[in-house]
Image: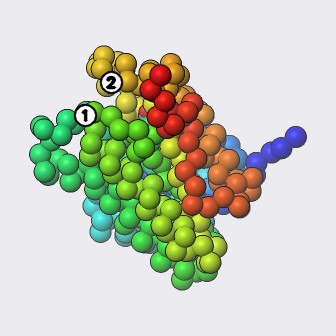
């Protein structure tokens, strides 16, 4: 029997109240990890959600935060390291957007989608890597991308190009920090039958047709994405660095049959 014990790990997760994150938080908590959870939701809302998810008191801390506010983001990350000096894993998971066709997306909307999905992850990485270098921690950062980083689709040019930037950024820093023991990887879901894409999938026939065609009829479960995170966080994934792990039923291959 293989069992996964993360009781010596402290894991920071952004976007921790979301649909996919629910299963990440439940699984990582069940594996014994201490969790530092960040999300836009208020502390009161989060407390209620975490109670419903049965995450034991005392095994997590929660901060309400907008990750596009770089100063607040940096302050909260640095505070998390003061409280948990052994914080050794970071999941840059917050992201998403609805449909934003290029012609009707203003420059400031485009920039905001890019900041949320890409530049905020750069702020996260800069702050966390500085802490890990100072503390000589061989930490592991994992970002959440999407198959649309590699399979172009209409109506989401800002989101898709921000995720493409994120994937290459992760590979660049993985290479640059490889000698230090710090690792960077990416998990890239296909279309998940939950969360940010659900409304669009239900309401837009063109989007639905595209998704079902490239994924050969399969949508991912949020549980399977969470399993990919547990694997990469576990000792089973300890030699993996600079990789994009696609949990997408092959959608990222770009098969248009
Ligand atoms: N759902 C999908 O089909 C799908 C597919 C591929 C990739 N992804 C990626 O998976 C990740 C999670 O997606 P999801 O569908 O579970 O999302 P979701 O919309 O269910 O959850 C997103 C969470 O992020 C929080 N959030 C929003 N703006 C924030 C901000 N500025 N600062 C901090 N937190 C903020 C929200 O409160 C929410 O809890 C994203 O990176 C998304 O791009 C999702």
- Percent across and percent down for residue 40 are 34, 48
- Residue bearing mark 1: 155
SS of the residue under disc 1: loop
User: Image quadrant of ligand 1?
Assistant: top left
- Percent across and percent down for residue 231 are 68, 47
- State left or right for residue 98 relative to residue 48: left
Q: Quadrant of residue 103?
A: top left
* Cα–Cα span, label 2 and label 1: 9 Å
The answer to whether residue 46 of the structure is visible from this angle is no
SS of the residue under disc 2: helix
- State left or right for residue 208 relative to residue 233: left
Q: Quadrant of the N terminus?
A: top right
Cβ at disc 2 under 8 Å from ligand 1: no
Cβ atoms at labels 2 and 1 below 8 Å apart: yes
- Percent across and percent down for residue 179 are 62, 78
Image point 44% across, 67% down: which residue?
A: 125
Q: Which mark is residue 207?
A: 2
Image point 29% across, 69% down: which residue?
A: 71
- State left or right for residue 202 relative to residue 143: left
Q: Residues within 10 Å of mark 2 (few under 14, many from 20)?
A: some
- Percent across and percent down for residue 74 are 37, 69
């Amino acid at each position: 029997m293989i069992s996964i014990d993360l009781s010596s790990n402290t894991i920071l997760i952004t976007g921790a109240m979301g649909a996919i994150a629910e299963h990440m938080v439940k699984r990582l908590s069940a594996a014994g990890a201490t969790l530092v959870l960040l999300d836009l939701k208020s502390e009161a809302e989060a407390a209620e959600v975490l109670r419903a998810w049965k995450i034991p008191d005392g095994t997590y801390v929660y901060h309400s935060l907008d990750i596009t506010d770089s100063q607040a983001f940096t302050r909260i990350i640095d505070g998390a390291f003061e409280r948990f000096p052994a914080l050794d894993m970071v999941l840059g998971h917050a992201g998403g957007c609805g449909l934003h066709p290029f012609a009707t997306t203003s420059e400031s909307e485009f920039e905001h989608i890019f900041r949320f999905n890409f530049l905020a992850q750069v702020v996260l990485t800069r702050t966390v890597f500085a802490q890990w270098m100072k503390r000589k921690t061989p930490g592991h950062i994992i970002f959440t991308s999407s198959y649309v980083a590699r399979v172009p689709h209409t109506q989401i040019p800002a989101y898709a190009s921000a995720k493409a930037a994120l994937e290459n950024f992760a590979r660049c820093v993985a290479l640059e920090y490889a000698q230090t023991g710090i690792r960077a990887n990416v998990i890239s879901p296909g279309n998940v039958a939950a969360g940010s894409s659900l409304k669009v999938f239900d309401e837009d026939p063109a989007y639905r047709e595209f998704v079902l065609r490239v994924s050969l009829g399969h949508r991912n479960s949020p549980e399977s994405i969470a399993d990919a995170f547990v694997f990469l966080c576990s000792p089973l994934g300890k030699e993996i660095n600079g990789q994009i792990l696609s949990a997408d039923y092959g959608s990222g291959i770009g098969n248009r049959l």
